[in-house]
Image (cartoon, coloured by chain):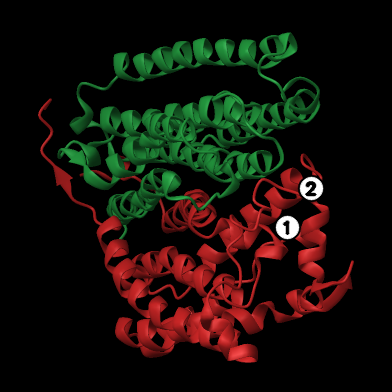
Chain colours: A red, B green
Amino acid sequence: MSASQSAVRSRAEAVAVSRTFDWMILFVLFTAVLGGYHIHFMLTGGDWDFWSDWKDRRLWVTVVPIVAITFPAAVQACLWWRYRLPIGATLCVLALLLGEWINRYMNFWGWTYFPINICFPSQLIPGAIILDVVLMLSGSMTLTAVAGGLGWGLIFYPSNWPVIAPLHQPVEYNGMMFTLADLSGYHYVRTGTPEYIRMVEKGTLRTFGKDVAPVSAFFSGFVSVIIYFLWHFFGKWFAGTGFIADDAS
Amino acid sequence: MAATTESVKADAAEAPLLNRRNIVLGMLLYFVFYSWVRWYEGVYGWSAGLDSFAPEFETYWMNFLYIELVLEVIVASALWGYIWKTRDRKVMSITPREELRRHFTHWTWLVMYGWAIYWGASYFTEQDGTWHQTIIRDTDFTPSHVIEFYLSYPIYIITGVSAFLYAKTRLPTYQEGLHLQYMVAVIGPFMILPNVGLNEWGHTFWFMEELFVAPLHYGFVFFGWAALGAMGVMNTEVMAIGKLIKKDLV
């Protein structure tokens, strides 16, 4: 092959081409993950994530980490094992949160007029950092699943405390006692408002009184470990580069 | 000396590896169009979109639906037909430089696909959630559905299939057969549209829009996972481009 047939003409051009592709790849990966992760998350844990009166001490704490660890595990499987990039989980969560925040402002508030403090998204960044750091330091999928997955579940409620604690303050209203989040929910009636729809604080876990959230977080972490394993293998499959027979050719 | 001058002139006249203008204009096109769509929703969602039996609903929403469906069929046929009709029949004999240029064009398509996926799967899908939490539906063609299902989904399908067709007809990398993950990344999100059939059929039985996490919606979830096929495309492209830019350089 002659020099004129080379794809690039100098090392400097090779570097420039490589950097340009990096940015294009990053954008496509970010937006594809954003779309896929967001549609997955809103339809498996969305109601708990949409409304502050669904952000309870039991089901929100249990469901959200379990359904949210999926894409981070899958993207880590690609970015770490192929490129040694310890950013898979954080990239997923940042993409999801960007999509959610834009939506909550532009549509939940901008189109249907819910105040932001009834429809802000859940905080997932601390858990994502734990997953990425454990994978980076250990280089082990098993340890990331067990320690990272458990940490992902356990850290969820504390990382949301600063924003949810004020809304969990008790108030008395017409002789009834409930939380500020419940009160704002009653003022902003939705098709998910009826108590036969709203899945919060149900069941005998309330027997444990103040210990509901830690028990839920621990259970969530346990299931997150299992889901991490599963989705890590999904991620490896999705990252495949194989071809199948093309009948047309 | 003369040969060098000619070579420099040839380089100057050569098309750039990446046409940045196309990316900027393409992204602006979607952004401006969807901003207008969002404005239309804001104005006519509340004023004409609450009662599907009202004459203004027919005027502002059903006519919107009819027009967009016709335009989508025309655009898809024209675009896919053009890409196929102008395919390179000697794709295996192009120069490495031309191959690299085509990879850049291919990535321009992929950037547009990612951008379209964002608007369809993220922006307009979650928007549908808040609309159904607010307005009780009395038709399959609610204002949010006219935009989400029948506008933003077809747009990302048209864009994604175009990217796939471009790769298949112009890049040597994809002549080995059908790239499995590329098909997953394009056909999976495409299947979300037919899944609307299940969704609407289910909603004729139950008013489940109160609950976004209802199992009726899990078909969307399953096909949404297919977006992860983008990782397989990315890996294939990284290997192909790596080979190209290392040629004669090491």
Q: Is residue A97 above or below residue A221?
A: above
Residue at horizontal 18%, vertical 50%?
Answer: A242
Residue at horizontal 77%, vertical 58%?
Answer: A185
Q: Residues within 10 Å of mark 2 (few under 14, many from 20)?
A: some
Label 1: which secondary element: helix
N-terminal of the pair, mark 2 or mark 1, is 2
Please tell me which residue lies in front, B238 or B234.
B234
Q: Amino acid at mark 1?
A: Cys
Q: Which residue is mark 2?
A: A109
Q: Position of residue A106 (x, y in %)?
A: 75, 45
2 and 1 marks on the same chain = yes
Number of numbered callouts drawn = 2
Q: Is residue B42 above or below residue A99?
A: above
Residue A190 placement, left or right of B175 = right
Are circles 2 and 1 on residues that touch, CB within 8 Å?
yes
Residue at horizontal 33%, vertical 76%?
Answer: A226
- Where residue A173 sits, quadrant-wise, is bottom right
Quarter of the image where the C terminus of chain B is located: bottom left
Disc number at residue B146? none
Q: Which residue is mark 1?
A: A119
Q: Position of residue A175 (x, y in %)?
A: 88, 71
